[in-house]
Image (tube, coloured by chain):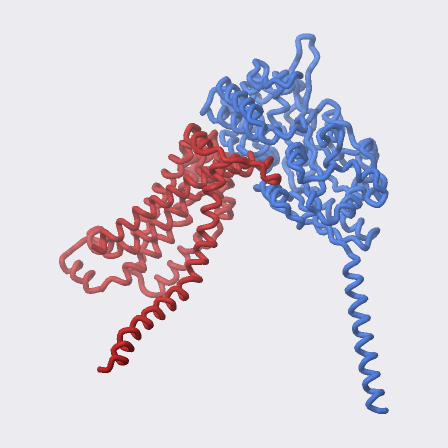
Amino acid sequence: MSKHELQKGTISPLRGRNRTLAFQVLTVFPAVALVVLVIGYPVYYLVSLSFTNVSAFNLLNQSYRWIRFRNYQKLFNDPIFLRAIAHTLGYALGTVGVQTLLGFWLASAVYRMSRLQKTLVTTLLLFPTMVADIAGALVWRPLFDVSTGVLNYFIKALGFSTVNFLGDPILARITVMAVAVWQWTPYMFLFVLAGMESIDTSLYEVAKLEGASSRVVMTRIVAPLIRPVLLVAVYFRITDSLRVFDKVFVLTGGGPGSATETISTYIQRTGFANMEYGLASAGGVVMLGIAFLFGLISLKLVSAYND
Amino acid sequence: MVRNTKATRFTLLLLALVLILGAGTLHAQDVVTINIAVKSASEVVTYRKAAEGFMKENPHIKVVIDELGRDGYTERIRTLLLTGSSDIDIVNFTNGEVGAFAKIGVIENLMPYFDDPQANTYGITPGMFLDGPRAALSIDGDMYALPYGTSTLLLYYRTDLIENPPKTWDEFLEIAKQFTKSHNPNSPTEYGTTIQGKRQSTAMREFAAYLWSFGGDIFDQDGRVVVNSPASKEALAFWVDLYRQGLVPPDVTSYEYGQVVEAFQQGKAAMVMQWDAAAGSFADPEQSPLVYDKLGVAMAPGKELADGTVLHVPYLQSWAFAINTASKHKKEAFQFLSYFNTPEKYLENMHANDSTALKDVLEADGFKEGRVHYEAYKESLQYGRAFPSSHHMDRIQNILDFSLARALSGEQTVDAAMETAAREIQELLDNE
């Protein structure tokens, strides 16, 4: 091997690696730039606003100033905001929990159906998810009326006294959650069903031969095998539920009192109604933090499963 | 020579085309479009009719009415104005917003436009408007918006059930009990009355009539916060008591305009406090087959004073039109407003449910005709009042609205709710 060849041999692979690296950077750059632009900058702007006293009255002349953590102090000293966090977490965990259980139950029932039945039932079940949140709530609102609502009509017909779905603080919370369960259970059902379809049928057959009940099949075979997919679905549902606004706004407006106040209605009230954008931004950061926390937990659970 | 002729013909044809297209473009440039954002309501029919009438008389101005939904309307308008968007030239909102928008500088002071003959082409003057709405839309004497109508909450009652409408709150309470099944099993209606108790809607505006007539207020004459005064608390206690005693449907915490209309139309309540805009639908046999022929309308009740007189203070509100500071066609926008607020044009364009803020229109036969609520309405305008046009007012209303909701739901006592409201209002003022 000549000196020249040796040099060529040592330099050439480096050049190749550099070229590969440059190609990789160039390929990834648009995606990274897009993420930074679409997610990074708004988050940075939100966080920076949360440390200012910006409001409608100082926004246009740019006379707002840094007030350090005062917005956060105000938020965490406000019992309504703390209640809003509790309601939001309760709503997200409660609705997603019920949606997951019902999703399993529906999927196990639909799984045993013929292909035609499966297609028909799945299509029908998916209808609520295609409805916009606000439209769903508007449809349900008159049904919950104490005097003229269809639900109370049947309740009265069965001989029971009327139910104050939206006027009672606890019932109002449950009612809003029930509408969410109605709308988003099919989403979980679809994930579970898809997971079930991907499992080797021989496992079901063995379980059947061993005399395992449906419950055992679901909890011992299906659930563990589809866990990663399910975790992703649960994560999506939880982060989406944390943003709940439309349903609450239409059905109760956050009331009675603050019974159904969520972080989003709180942010809407401070940001859009009271025009305190700095304070509302701080609320947004808290919401983002909670969603981020759920994201970390989900990732941890998925990686624990993979390990 | 032939080639030259062809070339000449081609050039002439091209020139003609350019001229035709150019003329078209010039014509298109001459037409100015003004966009008006309005809240979805029965009055939109009038706005559209007025726009058509105006465009006939002013073909160089095109008026586009952009009807936006009721939910979150104010928030959308605020965002639009605060972002400096020039997409909308004229915005429609209530007098409660004027103070804040004027202070921020996103709406025009209209006084110079009144004096500008190029803008005020129909010759309107501030003096043409009723004193109440004019004051409610003015800051330091300058009008920042022109009212379209003056709304007020009236008492609608069933004449087959109630012979004499209640004049005082005590009478109102007694009649409400008489027509509530849980208090009187023989009552033909389930509830005596209703309230608009949904948070972030009109609860505070309805409550204002109770607050003021009980002698309470938000500020006293020296500008001190008095929502926690005994009279203010007494008013809230009375309002909350209607709910506690079951004289209103138990889900009124989710009631706003639509639910109250339904409650009366469907015979659920014997009397309701509702906006004057509902009079038309209550008197319509198709919309209200149960009640249209037994409809009575009166001014909102008041508090009986020690000397036997009754203090009536109905709440007044004006839906108004203001010009966006960022608009590129402010003069044209005012031209439309001047057309719209000319009494003759108003009478031509108005819809059966519309209210008015024009002195001449209020007295016109054309306005009185077909309005079952005319006398009660006129009386209400005489005794009523609006919130002051301060730039804090909007946020103060929100604070009070939340306090009312918390008192109504039992989350706070009446005392605590009013003390909280007073503290928060004071904090707001101190932070300014």
Find the residue positioned furthest to the front.
Answer: A3
Taking the spot 57% from the left edge, 19% from the top edge, the residue there is B227
Furthest residue toward top = B307
Q: Residue B265: x, y in percent? A: 61, 36
Residue found farthest to the left = A210
Residue B83: quarter of image: top right
Instruction: Please state the total of marks drawn on the protein image.
Output: 0
Is B270 positioned to the left or the right of A187 in the image?
A: right
Q: Nearer the viewer, residue B234 or B428?
A: B428
The residue closer to the viewer here, B177 or B257, is B257
Q: Is residue A169 left or right of residue B156?
A: left
Kindly identify the residue that appears in the image at 45 percent across and 51 percent down.
Answer: A39
- Viewer-nearest residue: A171 or A260: A260
Where is the N terminus of chain B found, in terms of image quarters? bottom right
The colour assigned to chain B within the rendered structure = blue
Figure quadrant of residue A10: bottom left
- State whether residue B387 is above or below residue B113: above
Q: In the figure, B158 relative to B346: above or below?
A: above
Give the left or right position of residue B351, taking residue A195 as reference. right
The color chain A is rendered in:
red
Query: B23 or B71: which is nearer to us?
Result: B23
Is residue A201 among what the camera can see?
yes
Give the position of the C terminus of chain B as an image quadrant.
top right
- Is residue A162 in view from this perspective? no
Q: What percent of the width, then of the height, locates residue A43?
A: 45, 47
Q: Position of residue A42 (x, y in %)?
A: 48, 48
